C-alpha cells in the first residue's frame, strides 16, 4: 500500500488543477478553429493509447484491466465523460473559460444531491441546506443583465450534471472494480464512441495547431496521472477542496489570454457555490470519520 502523505497529495492536486486549466485553454483555442468532435476524438485516441500502455505494464498485462463486473455501467461512464467533454469545450468557445467554470463549479453539489437516489447514501439536512445555498449562488451567476445569462449557460450546467453522474457511477463501480479497470474502460470506450462521431467531422489542421493538439494530448494524460497519484498518497476528502483552485487558474488564463471579463455577479456567485461545495466536502469527511 502506498504510504499516505497529505502534504504531497495537496501539492499533486494543485499541480493537477494547473494542468487542467492549461488543458482547457488549449481546448478553447483548438475548438475555436476546428470541429469540437474532431478535437475531442484525437484527444481520446491519445488517452486510449495511454491507458492501454499503462495497463499493459501492470502485472498480468491487459487482462486484469479489461475484466470488469459492471461492463454496461463502465460503457455508460465512458460515453458520459466523452459527451460531457464535448459539451464543456463547446461552452468554452460560446461562453468563455471563466463563465463556463463558474457554472460548472456546481457539480460537487449535484454529486451530493444525487448520491441518495444513485448510491443510496443518506443526505442530511445540513448537506441539503448547503445544496440550496449553492443553487442560490448559481442564480446569482445567471442573473439577468449579465453576459453569462443566456440559454448557452445551460450547456455547462448540463455538462456539470453529466460529470456528477459520471463521478457517482465511478464510485458505484469502485465497489467491485479497481481504479485501473475504470481508468482503462474510460479511455477505450471514450475513444471508440468519439471515433464513431468525430471521424465524420475530420478537417485539415495547420502544422502549428498540430503542436497545440500534441500539447492538449500530453496535458490530458499528465493531468490524469497526477490526479491518480494525488489520490494514491492522500485521502480524497483532504485534497478535494484544492480542486476548486482550478477556477482561480482558469480566471487568470481567461483574463490574460482571451480578454474575458470577470463580472461582479460571477465572482459573488462563485464564492457562494464554492463555499457550499467546501461545506459538503467537510461534512463528507466528518461522516467518513464517524462524526
Image: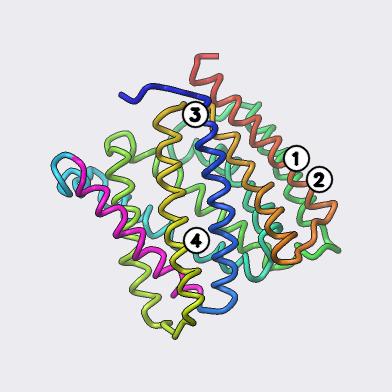
Q: Pick the residue in front: 126 or 212.
A: 212
Spatial CA distance of label 4 from label 1 is 25 Å
Circle 1 residue: 272
Q: Pick the residue in front: 176 or 101.
A: 101
Q: How many residues crowd around disc 2 within 10 Å: few (fewer than 14), some, or many (20 or more)? A: some
Q: Regarding mark 2 in the picture, which secondary structure is present there?
A: helix
Q: Of the numbered discs in the image, which one, if any, rests on residue 8?
A: 3
Circle 4 residue: 85
Q: Regarding mark 4 in the picture, which secondary structure is present there?
A: helix
Viewport quadrant of the N terminus: top left
Question: Mark 2, mark 3: which one is toward the viewer?
Answer: 3
Circle 2 residue: 268
Q: Earlier in the sequence, mark 4 or mark 2?
A: 4
Q: Is residue 43 above or below residue 131?
A: below
Residue at x 33% of width, y 47% of height: 183
Spatial CA distance of label 4 from label 3 is 28 Å
Q: Pick the residue in front: 102 or 107.
A: 102
Q: Please name the predominant secondary structure of the magenta segment in the image.
A: helix
Highlighted range, magenta: 36-58
Kindly indicate whether the residue at mark 3 contacts the one at mark 4 (C-beta within 8 angstroms).
Answer: no
Q: Pick the residue in front: 186 or 10.
A: 10
Kindly indicate whether the residue at mark 2 contacts the one at mark 1 (C-beta within 8 angstroms).
Answer: yes
- Residue 160 colored magenta? no
User: Percent position (x, y) of residue 20?
Assistant: 54, 52
Residue at x 58% of width, y 48% of height: 18
Q: How many residues crowd around disc 3 within 10 Å: few (fewer than 14), some, or many (20 or more)? A: some
Q: Is residue 278 left or right of residue 55?
A: right
Q: Earlier in the sequence, mark 4 or mark 1?
A: 4
Q: Is residue 144 above or below residue 2?
A: below
- Residue 38 colored magenta? yes
Spatial CA distance of label 2 from label 3 is 31 Å
Amino acid at each position: 500500500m502506498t504510504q499516505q502523505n497529505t502534504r504531497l497529495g495537496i501539492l499533486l492536486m494543485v499541480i493537477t488543477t494547473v494542468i487542467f486549466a492549461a488543458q482547457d485553454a488549449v481546448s478553447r483555442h483548438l475548438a475555436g478553429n476546428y470541429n469540437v468532435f474532431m478535437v475531442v476524438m484525437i484527444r481520446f485516441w491519445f488517452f486510449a493509447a495511454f491507458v492501454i500502455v499503462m495497463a499493459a505494464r501492470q502485472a498480468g498485462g491487459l487482462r486484469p484491466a479489461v475484466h470488469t463486473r459492471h461492463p454496461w455501467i463502465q460503457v455508460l461512464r465512458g460515453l458520459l465523460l466523452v459527451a460531457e467533454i464535448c459539451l464543456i469545450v463547446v461552452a468554452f468557445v460560446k461562453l468563455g473559460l471563466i463563465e463556463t467554470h463558474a457554472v460548472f463549479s456546481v457539480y460537487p453539489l449535484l454529486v451530493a444531491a444525487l448520491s441518495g437516489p444513485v448510491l443510496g447514501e443518506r443526505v442530511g439536512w445540513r448537506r441539503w441546506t448547503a445544496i440550496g445555498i449553492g443553487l442560490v449562488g448559481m442564480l446569482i451567476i445567471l442573473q439577468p443583465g449579465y453576459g453569462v445569462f443566456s440559454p448557452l449557460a445551460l450547456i455547462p450546467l448540463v455538462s456539470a450534471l453529466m460529470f456528477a453522474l459520471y463521478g457517482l457511477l465511478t464510485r458505484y463501480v469502485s465497489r467491485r472494480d479497481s481504479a485501473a479497470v475504470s481508468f482503462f474502460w474510460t479511455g477505450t470506450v471514450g475513444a471508440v464512441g468519439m471515433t464513431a462521431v468525430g471521424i465524420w467531422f475530420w478537417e485539415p489542421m495547420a502544422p502549428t495547431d498540430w503542436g497545440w493538439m500534441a500539447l492538449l494530448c500530453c496535458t490530458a494524460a499528465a493531468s490524469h496521472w497526477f490526479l491518480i497519484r494525488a489520490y494514491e498518497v492522500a485521502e480524497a476528502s483532504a485534497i478535494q477542496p484544492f480542486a476548486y483552485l482550478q477556477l482561480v487558474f482558469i480566471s487568470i488564463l481567461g483574463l490574460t489570454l482571451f480578454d474575458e471579463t470577470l463580472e461582479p455577479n460571477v465572482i459573488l456567485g462563485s464564492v457562494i457555490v464554492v463555499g457550499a461545495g467546501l461545506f459538503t466536502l467537510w461534512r463528507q469527511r466528518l461522516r467518513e470519520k464517524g462524526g
